[in-house]
Image (cartoon, rainbow, N blue to C red):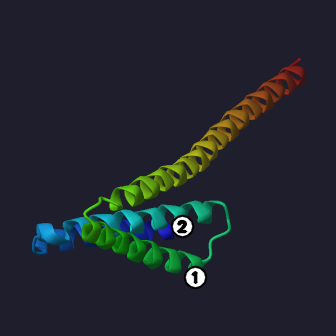
Amino acid sequence: MIFIAILIGCILGAILGLNAPMISYTYSSYLAIAIIAALDSVFGGIASVIKKNFDLKIFISGFFGNAILAILLTILGQKLNVDIYLAAIVVFVWRMFMNLGTIRRYYVEKWSDMLKEKASKKEKDKKENKQEEKQEEKQEA
């Protein structure tokens, strides 16, 4: 369900992005850090769904809280003439990769379990076929 929502959001974002006006250079750093913070929250939400401890309140508060905090760090950094937002980018991207690792592990394990089940089912079917053939041979003899 959540993957369908993500897919719809990506498609709508792409369509709107093609028709939206260009963002000025002045605001591009704010938008970039807000997008990275939001993506971190989305990957964290997907990972928490996989771990079966998803809470919508925590997801929404983290989504907006992370984005606002990141934007405020960017503003503070520009006022101080220090690139503080780079620290936020490093942290958010690190967390995104950690969550992506969790998601990847889950689906790789799920896929390998599915392949093992198919292989064991094939072996079981082969054994049943051999037993049936042996029974038919006994009946014929």
Q: What kind of element bears circle 2?
A: helix
Asked if residue 31 shows in the view, the reply is no
- Answer with the quarter of the image where residue 135 lies: top right
Point 53% across, 50% down: residue: 98
Which label belongs to residue 35?
A: none
Q: Position of residue 139 (x, y in %)?
A: 89, 25
Query: Where is 132 relative to 40, above or below?
Result: above
Q: What kind of element bears circle 1?
A: helix
Q: Is residue 138 left or right of residue 63?
A: right
Q: Is residue 6 left or right of residue 102?
A: left
Point 69% across, 40% down: residue: 117
Circle count: 2
Seen from the viewer's position, the closer of residues 72 and 113 is: 72
Point 89% across, 21% down: residue: 138
Residue with the mark numbered 2: 45
Which label belongs to residue 57?
A: 1
Seen from the viewer's position, the closer of residues 105 and 71 is: 71
Query: Where is 140 relative to 124, above or below?
Result: above
Amino acid type of disc 2?
Gly
